[in-house]
Image (cartoon, helix red, strand yellow):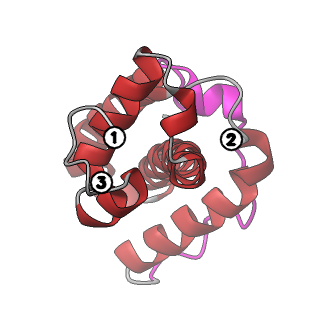
Amino acid sequence: MQGVNSNLSLKELYKIDDHLWLEETIKLLKDNHLEELDLENLIEELENFGRRDKAKVASLLEKIIRHLLLLQYWTQEYQYNSGHWKAEIRSFRNQLKRNLTMNLYLDNELASIYDDALGYVIEKTEGKLDNFPQYCIYTLEQLLDINYLPENL
């Protein structure tokens, strides 16, 4: 194996230093030394990469929903916090725009993401509000639209 202690296999390197393993794997791919690849760990890393992307997008969508719900339903705090909530929504949408690939599963996960966001805002408002919708009232297109805000604001 090029660049690595010849007594150490790529599989062993993965257990010791995954960053160095990644560098060596990239070198092997670039040099077309495919027979030397640690395919088992490479496949695992690629699968993890996809899961991390999906989790990042879901997290940003959840934060958008949280702030939309607070903005739309927590009227007692609207005057003091609406500017902050709107700025956060924009920030999360900007991050999504940079990280989103359209082939992610978003529509299928929206109900679950909404449930998580709803749990958060109920906690945040200390359960004092009972007017939050039980089901997601926002479409994926609205959540991703940089300019969308609910009409009643």
Q: Which residue lies furthest to the front in this view?
A: 7
Read off the residue under disc 2.
Answer: 138
* Mark 2–mark 1 distance (CA, rounded to whole Å): 40 Å
Read off the residue under disc 1.
Answer: 22
Picture quadrant of residue 123 = bottom left
SS category of the residue bearing label 1: helix
Q: Which of marks 2 and 3 is nearer the N terminus?
A: 3
Residue 126: where, in percent of width, then height? 38, 83
Residue drawn 25% across the image and 48% down it = 6
* Mark 2–mark 3 distance (CA, rounded to whole Å): 40 Å
Q: How many marks?
A: 3
Question: Along the line of sight, which residue is nearer the eye, 58 or 31?
Answer: 31
41 sits left or right of 24 in the view: right
Q: What stretch is highlighted in magenta?
A: 128-149
Check whether the beta carbons of the residues at disc 1 and disc 3 lie within 8 A of each other. yes
Name the amino acid, label 1. Answer: Leu
Picture quadrant of residue 2 = top left
